[in-house]
Structure formats: structure tokens, C-alpha cells
Amino acid sequence: MNNAAIILITIFSLSFAFAQKNMAGIIVNKETKEPISYAHLIIPSEKRGTTSDVKGNFKFSVPDAWIGKELKITCVGFEDKKVVLTQEKGLVIYLKPSIEFLNSVHLTHKERQKRKRVNPFRGKRIIGLGNFSDGDYPSMFARYYPFIEKLGDENYVEEVTVLLFKEGRHNAKFRLRILSSTKDKMPKDDLLNPILVSVIYNEGKVKVKIPFNGVEVPREGFFVVIEHLFIKENEVREIVNLKVNDSVKVQNVQQIRYAPIFAGIVEKVDESHSYYMSVNGWKKVGKLKMPRSDFKQNEVVAPAFKIKLTN
């Protein structure tokens, strides 16, 4: 890199640093006045975002050019809220509990007789499934599972095993969610409160027991969702080399991504009913740019789960 390029990049970096300040505050339950853990704050127009920590606190940089743009706050069990971006600190943002969510949860205390294990990825290629947003905003992946008639008139999700990729393992936390499905096999509503899952760095998989004896599966089927949390304890700092163009390269740049890296499977587009959460809602993984050059045009990546169902 020549001296002019170094000066240009340095000036640009300093100008950007001086042209932005932090927006910081806390997300609070409007009724109980208690902090809300792991709410997502997304700036749709910029495709940027973060997650409130366990105490509801959040902080992120807001360049001058972003002031006045929309900030969307979402959390399971609460109504979405939109506010205007500022560079203020000490903000208190209230979320109203969702009555519809509270009325939809259906757990069972009964012991069940029949069990069915679903493992749809035997013999398929495994790859790493990390932050598809390159660490710009919290990511989610959802995979569809049908109602199994052979189990009987009722199906319950009893256990979900989430597989983790063998490379880049770290201590981390993520949330597991179970969603209902539309008739067109699209993610719909949460069927229970999200489950916070802790991962130890050397684990290859983690088994998650559903509370009580399981959550009931609607006839339309259900989705299992893994949700990244952009919180301090999940940060992984890496040194990478960036290429600006053919003549300008930047070496040893620190980049932040968020653990864990899940195991993903490669499957055909027409076989897949998996989705990812974009800043504008759920989209089929077929619309997501594949992370590797050896993907074929008709291949997509989907999360790898093992599901235990009961009747």
C-alpha cells in the first residue's frame, strides 16, 4: 500500500470516529418496570443492530448520518416498538407485554408413551453456520418439521439437540425457540418462552429439554429456531486482512463476530423449508448468499437439529 492510500484510510477512519457517538440505555417491561433481557435493536435501513444484555442494557454507535432514522426493538412476548435514532445516553425504552403471546402457550405435564426421533441430515454435508449478517445484526435460522400422524392425535416436542460446528468453538449463549407454522410452511408464532442455552467451548452438541413434558405441535407443523445474541460474552475478536480494491489492501484489521457457530447442512433448494430472519422479516434460505464458492446453484444451507417428539 502506498503512502497516499494509508493517509486516505487514516483520515477516513478518524473522520468516521469523530462523526459518531453512542446511543445507550435500557429496555424495560412497561407493566412490571423490570429490565428485559436479550431484546433485539435493529436499524432496518442500515442493516445494523445489537442485543440488550441480561440486565436490559444496550449501547451502539450512531453516526451523524443515522440520526432520525428508525430503530426497531423486538423481543418475544412483547409488542414490537419503533423509535427514532438519537445519540442520547440514559434512555429508557418501554415494551408492552403481548397478550396474544401469553394466550398461545400450551405445555403438557402428562407422561407420554410413544416417541419419535427426527434426524433429517444423515449423509449430508456439514458446514459452519455463523452470523450470516457478518456480525452487523443478530441472526436467526428456522427449520420446519411436520406433524407426524403415526404418533397419534397429539404431537409434543420433548427435546431438541443443536449441533455445533467443530471449528471456532467458544463459550457462548444463544436462544432456542419453537414456532408454529402457517399452512404454507412459514414461521408464525412462538409456542413457548425462548430457552436460554449456554454452550461450553469444547461441546459438539447441546441437548435442550423442553419445559415440563413438551410443547404441543399444531397440525400445520412447527419450526425450531436458533437465535444469535449480540452480547459481550459472545464476542469473538479476530484479525483479518481486508481488500478494498485491486490496489488497496488493509492488513491486520480487528473484526468482531458472535459465537456460537452452529452446524449447518447442505440440502437442495426444493427440499428445504428453512428460513433466516432478515431486517424485514423471515425469508427462505434460498435468498441468502451462500458462504462458500463450492455451493451449487440449487444448494442451500439449513440448521442441523435432532428432534425428539412424543404423543
Image (spheres, grey):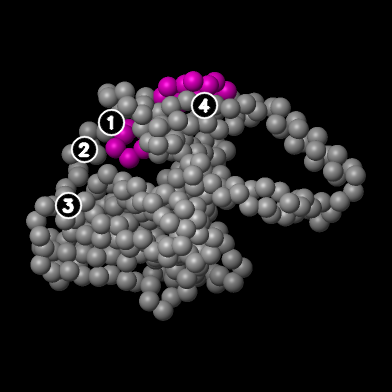
Q: Amino acid at mark 4?
A: Ala
Q: Position of residue 117 (x, y in %)?
A: 25, 70
Magenta part mainly helix, strand or loop?
loop
Q: CA distance from mark 4 to mark 3?
A: 38 Å
Looking at the image, residue 107 lies above or below residue 86:
below
Whether residues under marks 4 and 3 lie with C-beta atoms below 8 angstroms apart, the answer is no
Camera-near label (1 vs 3) is: 3
Of the 4 image quadrants, the one containing the C terminus is: bottom left
Total numbered labels: 4
Q: Residue at x 41, y 31 (%)?
A: 56
141 vs 176, nearest the viewer: 176
The residue labelled by disc 3 is 212
The residue labelled by disc 2 is 102
Of labels 1 and 3, earlier in sequence is 1
Q: CA distance from mark 1 to mark 2?
A: 8 Å
Whether residues under marks 4 and 2 lie with C-beta atoms below 8 angstroms apart, the answer is no
Q: Which mark is residue 24?
A: 4
Q: Which mark is residue 97?
A: 1
Camera-near label (4 vs 2) is: 4
Residues drawn in magenta: 74-93
Q: Position of residue 166 (x, y in %)?
A: 49, 67
Q: CA distance from mark 4 to mark 2?
A: 29 Å
Judged left or right of residue 183, residue 282 is right
- Residue 119 sits inside the magenta stretch: no
